[in-house]
Image: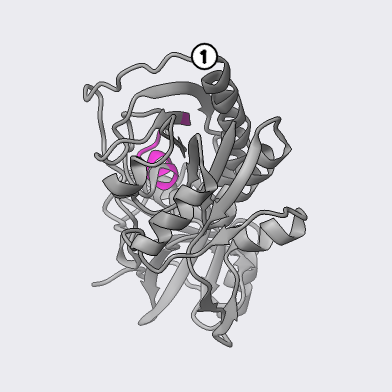
Amino acid sequence: MRVVFMGTPDFAVPSLAGVAQSGHELAGVVTRPDRPRGRGRKMRATDIKAAVASLGLDVPVLQPESLTDAQFHAQLQVLKPDLFAVVAFLILPRSVLAIPRLGSVNVHPSLLPKYRGAAPIQWAIINGETETGVTIFQLSPRVDTGDILIQKKVAIERDETAGELYARLKAKGAALLVRAIDGIADGSVTPVPQADEGMSRAPKLQKEDGGIDWSKSACEIRNLIRGANPFPGAFTLWRDALLKVHRATLDAARGDAGVVIGADDKHGLIVGTGEGGLALNEVQAAGKKRVSGPEFVRGYRIEIGEKLGSN
C-alpha cells in the first residue's frame, strides 16, 4: 500500500519511522514550511523534514504554504497515494481528504471522544485524569470526529508531567498507527462510528492558562503544574516578579491560600492553598535557572508569611 505521511513536530517522528520501516511503501512526506526558530531566529527544518534525512529516506518532501493550493494537490495526485497517515499536522480540507483511495488516518493522544482538540495530553493531566490513551481514527471534515479504528488505554503515572506523558504516547501512537495501516491493508480492522456521548474539548493552551490560583485545592494546583510542564509552564507572582513552578507535591501542612507556611533548607518552600498545603519542589525565579525548593529558600531567604500571587 502506498502511504503519504503528513506531520511536523517531534511527536510525529516515531510514527514516520514506523511507517517507513513497515511493509508498506512510503510514497512521500508532507510537512510545514521551514521557519526561523530559536534565539538566533535561524531557518530550521521541521522535525519531520530533519527525520527524513536522519532516517535516510529517499522520498519527496512537500512543504506547501497552503493546503488548498492547486499545485500542491497536483503533487499529491502524482504520488498516487492509497492512504494518508496524519500525525500532529494541520486540518486537511475536503479537497485533500478526497485524494487517497482508502482515506486518511490520524493519531490522537486521547480516548476519543474525550479531549477532542489541540492539547489532549495537557488537559487530561490538568483535570486529574488517571487514565488516557491513543486513538487511531479516520479523518473526516469535522475535526477529531471520524470513525475509530484502534484505541489503547494508557495509565497516567501519579507524578507524570505532560512532557513525560507526551514522550510515552508518541511511541505508543506510532505502534498503533502501523497496526491500523496493516489492518486497513488486509481488511482486518473495522471502523466504529465515534459517539458524541462523553465528548470533551481540549483547546490549545495559552501562556495565561499556566497562572496559579492559590484559592484552588493543592491537588488541583499540582495537576495544573504537571499539565503545564513544559508548556505553557505554571507560574505565580512573588515579590512583584514572575516565579515559575515546575514541580510540586502535596503536603499535610495547612494555611491561608498563597501564603508561605513552611520555608527551610530541608523541606523547602510550602505554600497554603484553598485546601491543603503544596510543597514547591522545583521553581525558577525570573531570569534565573531552575532550582530545588530548599535551594530557593537558601538563596532568597524566604520568610514564613510571605504572599504569592496577586493581592
Viewer-nearest residue: 243 or 91: 91
Q: Residue furthest bottom?
A: 40
Viewer-nearest residue: 193 or 264: 193
Location of the N terminus by quadrant is top right
Location of the C terminus by quadrant is bottom left
Q: Is residue 121 visible?
A: yes
Q: Position of residue 245 (x, y in %)?
A: 48, 62
Query: Height in image: 160 above or below 45?
Result: above
Residue under the image location 44 percent in, 29 percent down: 102
SS for dot 1:
loop
Residue under the image location 30 percent in, 36 percent down: 140
Q: Is 39 on the left or on the right of 217, as rendered?
A: right
Q: Is residue 258 visible?
A: no
Residue under the image location 41 percent in, 28 percent down: 111
* Colour style of the rendered protein structure: one colour
Query: Height in image: 179 above or below 162?
Result: above
Circle 1 Cα neighbour tier, 10 Å, few/some/many (<14 / 14–19 / ≥20):
few
Which residue range is magenta in the image?
121-135
For residue 159: magenta? no
Viewer-nearest residue: 224 or 20: 20
Q: Is 264 on the left or on the right of 207, as rendered?
A: right
- The quarter of the displayed image where residue 247 is located: bottom right
Three-letter amino acid code of the residue under disc 1? Gly
Viewer-nearest residue: 268 or 93: 93
Query: Height in image: 143 above or below 269?
Result: above
Q: Position of residue 47 (x, y in %)?
A: 61, 61
- The quarter of the displayed image where residue 282 is located: bottom right
- Disc count in the image? 1
Residue under the image location 58 percent in, 70 percent down: 297
Q: Position of residue 177 (x, y in %)?
A: 56, 32
**Residue for badge 1:** 187
Query: Height in image: 310 above or below 223?
Result: below
